[in-house]
Image: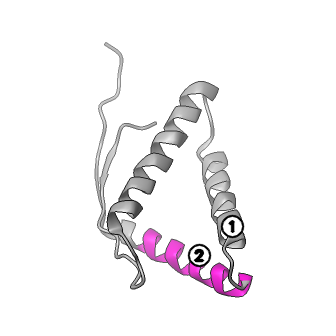
């Protein structure tokens, strides 16, 4: 947990049903990851990214649609989200000990 604040504007997919649900899921997933890391102790960023991408792959697979379609959708959404970070602003969290 870095404590950094990332101000990013994501473009939602044309078929997004509820942007509030998207926002709530993002918040819940990030909180869950932070909670797990705080319980486990030091976890490498690579391990976290690997786990998240594996979850994305599993989620794409369990959707009742051809895997070719959900795989392309997942890759497209991930790529667009990563590209949005090019325009993001990061506010460095405070570090140190009191």
**Residue 74: mark in rendering:** 2
Q: In this rendering, would 37 be left or right of 28?
A: right
Residue picked out by circle 1: 57
Q: In this rendering, would 73 be left or right of 47?
A: left
Instruction: Give the extent of the magenta segment.
Output: 67-83
- Look at the numbered disc 1 and give the secondary structure of its residue: helix
Q: Nearer the viewer, residue 68 or 85?
A: 68
Q: Residue furthest top?
A: 98
Residue occupying the point 40% across, 49% down = 27
Which quarter of the figure has residue 63? bottom right
The chosen color scheme is one colour
Residue occupying the point 54% across, 81% down = 76
Alpha-carbon distance for marks 2 and 1?
8 Å
How far from the left and from the top, in percent, is residue 42?
61, 30
The secondary structure that most of the magenta stretch takes on is helix
Which quarter of the figure has residue 68? bottom right
Are the residues at dot 2 and dot 1 in contact (C-beta closer than 8 Å)?
yes
Q: In this rendering, would 58 be left or right of 73?
A: right
- Mark 1 residue crowding within 10 angstroms, few (<14) / some (14–19) / many (20+): some
How far from the left and from the top, in percent, is residue 73?
57, 81
- Mark 2 residue crowding within 10 angstroms, few (<14) / some (14–19) / many (20+): some
Which quarter of the figure has residue 97? top left
- Look at the numbered disc 2 and give the secondary structure of its residue: helix
Q: Does the stretch in magenta take in 90?
A: no
- Asked if 5 appears above or below 87 in the picture, the reply is above
Number of numbered discs present?
Answer: 2
Residue occupying the point 34% across, 28% down = 95
Q: Nearer the viewer, residue 69 or 83?
A: 69
Whether residue 41 is visible, yes or no, is: no
Whether residue 56 is visible, yes or no, is: yes
**Residue 91: mark in rendering:** none
How far from the left and from the top, in percent, is residue 29?
50, 49
């Amino acid at each position: 947990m870095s404590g950094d604040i990332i101000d990013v504007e994501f473009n939602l997919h044309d078929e997004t049903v509820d942007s509030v649900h998207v926002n709530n899921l993002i918040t819940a997933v990030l909180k869950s990851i932070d909670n797990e890391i705080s319980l486990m102790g030091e976890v490498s960023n690579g391990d976290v990214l690997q786990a998240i991408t594996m979850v994305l792959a599993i989620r794409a697979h369990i959707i009742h649609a051809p895997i070719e379609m959900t795989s392309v959708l997942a890759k497209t959404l991930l790529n667009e989200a990563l590209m949005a970070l090019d325009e993001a602003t990061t506010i460095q969290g405070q570090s140190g000990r009191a």
